[in-house]
Image (cartoon, grey):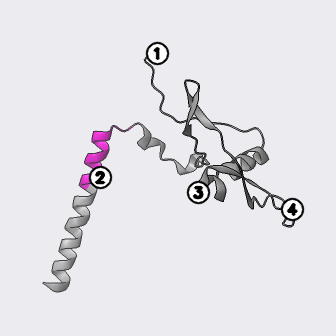
Amino acid sequence: AARLRSSGVVVVVFRYQHDQRKCLSRWNSFWARWFYCEGQDCGCLPSGNNFWKASELPKFPIGSIPVNRLSVQRAPNPGDIHWEEVGVARKTRLKMFAKTNLVMLLLICISFGICYG
């Protein structure tokens, strides 16, 4: 077990949508993106404004020392993922990419020749 390495990705499933939105607003606010800290509401503005800088966001510990910053993002919808491409080897994907781009380059050259040749 000591030799296992983590990918560094964690998938979290929320029971309620308002919990997900609250988590995303905490970790993707202005203060979180630029200064890695939470925002605090200003009393004269509507609630949830996060106008003032507040305490630092928690970090992931390595051993007992919190070192790594966390980043939170919403996962894409299942319909937006190309599930067929998930299991394709990298070498095969590069071959398909090269073939597609060579065909497009050929079509551009033919079009250029027709227009200006």
Q: Residue at x 54, y 51 (%)?
A: 80
Crowding at label 3, few (<14), some or many (≥20) Cα neighbours within 10 Å? few
Q: 75 and 97: which one is in front?
A: 75
Residue 29 seen in the figure = no
Crowding at label 2, few (<14), some or many (≥20) Cα neighbours within 10 Å? few
Disc with the residue nearer the chain's start (2 vs 3): 3
Q: Amino acid at mark 2?
A: Phe
Query: How far is disc 2 from disc 3 in space, using C-alphas?
Result: 36 Å
Q: Residue furthest left?
A: 117
Instruction: State the quadrant of the C terminus.
Output: bottom left
Q: Which mark is residue 2?
A: 1
Pointer 2 residue: 97
Disc with the residue nearer the chain's start (4 vs 3): 3
Query: How far is disc 1 from disc 3 in space, using C-alphas?
Result: 35 Å
Q: Nearer the viewer, mark 2 or mark 4?
A: 4
Pointer 4 residue: 43
Q: 21 and 57: which one is in front?
A: 57
Q: Amino acid at mark 4?
A: Gly
User: Quadrant of the rendered structure where residue 86 is?
Assistant: top left
Q: Magenta segment, principal secondary structure?
A: helix
Crowding at label 4, few (<14), some or many (≥20) Cα neighbours within 10 Å? few
Asked if the stretch drawn in magenta spans residue 52, the answer is no
Pointer 3 residue: 34
